[in-house]
Every structure is written in structure tokens, then in C-alpha cells.
Amino acid sequence: MGLKLPLYMFGVVFHESFLQFPKVITATEISKRLGIEYKSALKLKRRFQLFCSDHLPKYKVLTYRALEEEYKGFKLNPDTETDVAPKMGLKPYVSADACVLYSASQRANKGRSRYRYGGLTSSIFLSPKLGGKQVGTLVHGICIQNGPAFFESVSDTKANTIGPLLVEQIPYSVPLFTDSGYPWLYNIYKNHRSVNHSAKSSEARYKLARNRFCKLSVHNQVIEGSFRLLKSSFSSYCYIKPEYSKLYLDEFSFIKTSKFFGLDCITERCFGSQFSWEGRSTGAREATVVRIGQEKYPHRRSSKETKKWLIQAIKDRKYQEPEREERLRRNKEQNKYDLNSAEAISRSRKALAGEMKRFNDFWSDSQKSKHKRKREIKYENLSFKIWNSIQYYKESSEENPTVQFIADKFKLDKRTLMIILRKWLKYGLIQKRKLFNKESHDKRVDFSIVLKSDSLPHLLYTQLPKNKKIFRRMDQ
């Protein structure tokens, strides 16, 4: 629409971008190859990026459907100390991580230290004394082994920012492999596994552990390899402004994903068909092309109403940099994936709903001490591991696990385990059944655990309510 240059020039950019991948084609290269001015070449590059941005959501839908079909009913053993290789087999690994493309050096900060914020965001913003403007690009990526890859420009690596990207593109049954920077995924993806890159060695002569990159077949080298490809490719650009980073990343994601699915998949005739991962890992050699001549796409000309559509389209797809006040607000904002939703509270019984609200109030209060929060996180992580383990044991053996079995599996003291189980019994989340084969002289606490709820809500396990009656009963 409104292309004043010959149409074949867009075809050259389209064709060369696919041929040279993973090498990117820059505006300077386009101007030299086609013999046009740099401004015209840059607009031609922007048109191709808009084309990629428009059709990339179709590939995301196809990837979601393929993953959902591949991992339908798939479950890993909740015990994180077991090897996942026998269960995974030849299934593709799905990894997620974040990296920095262009950072703000100390020279850009006029000699000031750039470590103002924690994590990766410390290297993409200028010093607050210089305005705190974002000059670097923070990229979050989701990659499937020998398959598609999607990269998104983000402002931080917090759960409220990354969580929607993961939920939108990855089904809940998919085993997701990350590093230790995603501790909040344990209650969203039951098949989530992480590897600690900073694990310390058990031997005094070594500082770091030997299995810090791959432990029990758990690794995120799939996304690390994609980041290596992305960084080496984007070195041809030297630098891109953060506001245009979304366009460049959409272009790279579109071309890489089309090498796997092919281009016929995004046409109206083929879109929506079913795909499987079998036989689709050979790469670009089996990729197909769109037959534009057979489809007979009309060449539309611009009018007065659509004269500035290109400028507006680029503006709509720009990355919106958050203001400094917005960044400070996000730093204090509570992770919504660690709270009970209003819908879940409304569907629960009165006593359980009150406990769920008390959990939300505890984590929304910024005045709570650090050691209380740390202790509560420890019990909550343990409670979800126990809950998932009970579900997995019931489905695999068709029997209800006992208290002794859970204590031996997680190497727990029964007093610690009973703190969690008593809370579940109080609100009707589980039911205990007497063991018939237990001897009469055996006074140990042991019974079968029967789940009465499909999911486990967020509860407080160490913060008792300030009620005098409860403390009187405990004293008695």
C-alpha cells in the first residue's frame, strides 16, 4: 500500500532476508544492493518488519497448538532429584530466559556507576542523575528445541511482566526449563524445572559446582544457544534504539520460526491445520514458500485517508519505555502470580476464603519483616511440592500416599509435615483415612492422605491469627 518503489524491491528484501538468515540485512546493505537512498531503504526495511509483526501471531497460535497436542496429559515426577531424560525421551525441550542486547556503559553515564537497579535492568538504564532514560534493550526469549523461537522486548524481568508472555505462548502441561530466576513458576507450571547456575561445589578445592549448567538432564541451553545466535546477528546493526527493538525482534522471530513451519502456514487456506513435531526438525531445507502469483494479491494504492498509515503503523508497534515513576511503582508492586485471585476467593467456602484473604493481606503489607517472608516462602514452596507429589502418586499407583511415605520422600520431620497437613485438614482440602494394617501398639502419626480439592490455594503456614481463643487452646 502506497509503495512508490517498484514492487520487486520488496521481494528482494524479503528473499534476501530469508537466504542470509541468521545474518540480518541492514538498511545500508539494501541501499547499496538496490541503488536507492538510505531513507528509502530504511522505509523498505520498516515495511518488511511490519509484515513480520503482522503475521507473527499466527505462528504463535500454531506453536501453542502443536505444544498442546505434543504434551497432552504429560507429567514429570514432582521429585526434583530424579532424572527427567527417561520421561522426556525425544520430546523437544522448551526453555525461557532473558538477556541484554545493548547495555549502558559507564562511559555513557559520564563515568557514573550504572548499577542503580538490581538484575539485568541495571545495565539498560542511565543513572538517575542523567534522567534514568533507557538506552539498552532487555530481551525475553522462549525457544523450542530445533523449532520456533519468540523474542520480546521487556522493561524488567519481574513476574508481572514475563508471566503474561509465558502463559500466552506455553500451555500449562508443557515441561518448561529455566534457570533459577523464575521461582514463582512452581505453582503455575507443574512440570517446571530449573537449574542453578551459581551452585556451589561440595569440594573445597572448587568454587562452583560441576553440574551448575546441567543437572539430572535439566538445562536451558536451548534458549542460551538462541541468544548466542541473536547477539551475533544483531552485531551487524551496531546499535538500535529501544523504541524500535520490538520491530527488529519480531523480524528475527518471524524468519526463524518460518524456517520450521514454512510460509504456507500463514495463508488463509492453510492456517488452522494441525501440526506435529515429527519430521519437522530438519530446518530450512524443507521449508516452503508463499506463492504470491497464484494467490493474486491485489496491489492497493494509498488515498488521502491512508496516506500516513506507515508512520502510524510503526508508531503503534514501537516499544513503550516506562517512565521512572512507573518503574519505581513496579518494583514495589506485589507479584500477582503469588496471590489468590478474586475469582478463587469467591468460589471458596467462607472459612477458606477468609484465610486466602489473610494471605493476600500478608504479602501486600510492605512492613512485614524479611525473615517472616522468607520462612513463609519456604513453607509455601514445600506445600506445593507435597501437593503435586500426592497427585502424581495417586495417578501413577492408584493408591493414596501415607504421611510416612511423604516424610521419607522429602526427608522431613513429621512435625514440619503436620504443620502443613493440619492446615489442609482444617479447611477441608484433604481427608485422612485410618490405616488398617497398622499395629495397635504403633503410636506414630500415620494415615492415608486423600485429596478433596482439585487445586491448592495460597495459604499461610507460619503466621497464626492473633486470636486469644486459639492461644488458650494451645496452652491447654
Image (tube, grey):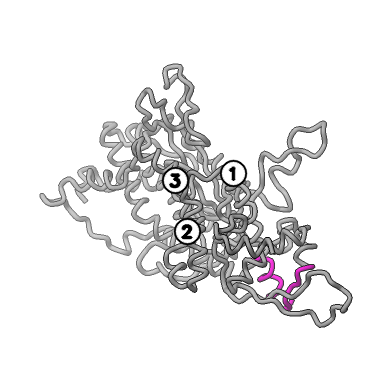
Find disc 3 in the rendering and name its residue: 252
Q: Please, is residue 291 above or below residue 350 in the view? A: above
Above or below 444: residue 42: above
User: Which quarter of the figure is the C terminus placed in?
Assistant: bottom right
Residues at badges 2 and 3 in contact (C-beta under 8 Å)? no
The amino acid at mark 3 is: Phe
Q: Position of residue 110 (x, y in %)?
A: 42, 17
Look at the image and say whether residue 306 sits in the magenta stretch: no
Which label is found at residue 225?
1
Q: Position of residue 4 (x, y in %)?
A: 20, 43
SS class of the residue under badge 1? helix
Residue name at image x 73 percent, y 36 percent: 208
The residue range painted magenta reads: 387-404
Numbered badge on residue 169: 2
Is 85 situated left or right of 41 in this image?
right
Single out the mark in the foreground, 2 or 1: 2
